[in-house]
Image (cartoon, rainbow, N blue to C red):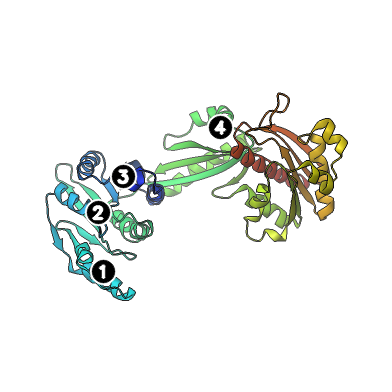
Amino acid sequence: MQTEIINIGDELLIGQVVNTNASWMSEQLDLAGFPVHRVTLIRDDPEEILTILKEAGQRAEVILITGGLGPTKDDLTKETLCRYFNTKLIFDPVSFQNIEKMFHARGFAMTEVNRKQAEIPENCIAIANANGTAPGMWFEITKTRAGTKQIYISMPGVPFEMKAMLVNEVIPRLKKCFQPVTVLHHTLLTQGIGESFLSDILEEWEAHLPENLHLAYLPQPGIVRLRLTGKGDNEVSLQKLMDEETDKLKSLIPEYIFGEGDTTLEAVVGNLLRNSGTTLATAESCTGGYIAHLITSIPGSSAYYKGSIVAYSNEIKIKELGVSERVLEKEGAVSEAVVITMASTVRNGFGTDYSIAVSGISGPDGGTEEKPVGTVWIAVAGPSGVKAVKYLFGDNRERNIRRTALQALNMLRKTILEQL
C-alpha cells in the first residue's frame, strides 16, 4: 500500500511560509503504519491540482491533500475536486451547524462567504474541523477490478486545524479501511565521527541486515544520527529483530554513541552531572556563550551548572582567567596552554567539579597558514586533571561554533564517565 501527500499553496512555493505540514504529516502517518512514499508541493492552480491528482491516483491507495479550503476566492480545492470526481457542491447542514456554532461562540456574525464553507462535493463525507470553519473531505473509491479501496482526504492547510483532524479523525478512519504495516524506528546518536567514516565501519554489518530492516545516516553539524527502521506484520517478532541488530550496531561503535532516540547531548551531560552530584563551569572564547546556552536550555540545569566567563578578548582572558601575556604573545590565544589555563582558572574560581574551556578561530576571517579557520582547542578539567585537544572543524562559522560546543560537551561526558 502506498501513501502520498499533496500540499497546495503559492505561499509555500515562494518560501513565504515553510511547509511544516509535510514533515509532521509524514511522521504521524509513518508511526500509524502508513509510510509516505511521495510528497508533492504545487501552486494554487486548478489544472496543476487535477494533473497531480490523476498521477497520484495511479500510484497510491491513500492520497492526503492540504491547502485551499478557506473562505477566500483563491481557495480552489473544493471546486477542483468536484471536477476530478465529476460531481457538484451541495450544502451540508451538519457542517453549517459546526461553523455557525463556532462563530456564535466567538461573537461573530455569519456571512454568505462563511456559509459557502458548508458546501462540499456531493460524493464526499465531511470531516468535522474542531479548530476551524472549513470541513475536511473524505472521498472513497472502490476499484472493482482489483477489489481494493482508494481514499482521497482533503484537509485545511492551517497547521493546527490539519493536525487535530489528521490525528483524531483521519488516521483512525484509515485504520478501519486498511491493515497498516508495523513500522518501528530506533535511533542511535553519535558524536566525534563523520558520516563516511561511520559508513566504512558499519559496511559489513549493514550489508547483512535482514531485508525488512534499513539503516539511515542523518548527519548534522557535530552529530550523526543512525536510524534503524524495520517493517513487518508482527510487532513482537519485528521488535526482537530490531533489538538484536541494534545490539550488534552498538558493539561496533561504542565509543561514539552518546544517546538514543530524541535526547540531546546537553541533556545526557546534564543527567550525568545531576546523578553524580557534581557541578560545572565554562570559559568560552570562540563559541561566545553557546555552550552555556546549550547547558541552560535543559530545565533544572541550575542544580549542576554554576556559570560562565565569555572571554572573547585577550584582555578578559588575562584579567579574568589568569592567562599569561607572555603565553599569549608566544603561543597565541588559540593554543593548548591558553585553554588549559582557562579551564583550570574557571574551575577553581567557581568551585566546581568540572569545567570546559574553548578557544578557536570560527571564521570567516582570522585564519593563518599555521592556524587556519576552524582551528579550535578544547580543554576539560576535572578531579583527575586537565585534558586539552586540538580540532580542525572547517571554514563555516556557524557550523564551527556548533561543532565546538558539541565536541566540548562530549569530551566532558567521557571525562565524567571515567570518574564513575
Q: Secondary structure at mark 3?
A: strand
Q: CA distance from mark 2 to mark 4?
A: 44 Å
Q: Earlier in the sequence, mark 3 or mark 4?
A: 3
- Residue placed furthest toward the top: 369
Q: Which residue is mark 1?
A: 99
Task: Count every numbered label the image shows and give the total.
Answer: 4
Check disc 4 and give the amino acid type.
Glu
Q: Nearer the viewer, residue 10 or 170?
A: 10
Instruction: Identify whether 151 is placed above or below 89.
Output: above
Q: Earlier in the sequence, mark 1 or mark 4?
A: 1
Q: Earlier in the sequence, mark 1 or mark 3?
A: 3
How busy is the neighbourhood of tag 1: few (under 14 within 10 Å), some, or many (20 plus)? many
Q: Nearer the viewer, mark 2 or mark 1?
A: 2
Q: CA distance from mark 3 to mark 4?
A: 30 Å
Q: Which residue is mark 2?
A: 75
Return the mark for residue 3.
Answer: 3
Residue 311, horizontal then vertical, whole percent: 75, 46
**Residue in the picture at 87% in, 35% down:** 326
Can residue 69 be seen? yes
Instruction: Identify whether 398 is placed above or below 420.
Output: above
Marks 2 and 1: CB-CB under 8 Å?
no
Q: Secondary structure at mark 1?
A: helix
Q: Which residue is mark 4?
A: 195
Q: Earlier in the sequence, mark 2 or mark 3?
A: 3
How busy is the neighbourhood of tag 3: few (under 14 within 10 Å), some, or many (20 plus)? many
Q: Secondary structure at mark 2?
A: loop
Q: Nearer the viewer, residue 322 or 313?
A: 313
Residue 350, horizontal then vertical, whole percent: 81, 55
Q: Nearer the viewer, residue 211 or 90?
A: 90
How busy is the neighbourhood of tag 2: few (under 14 within 10 Å), some, or many (20 plus)? some
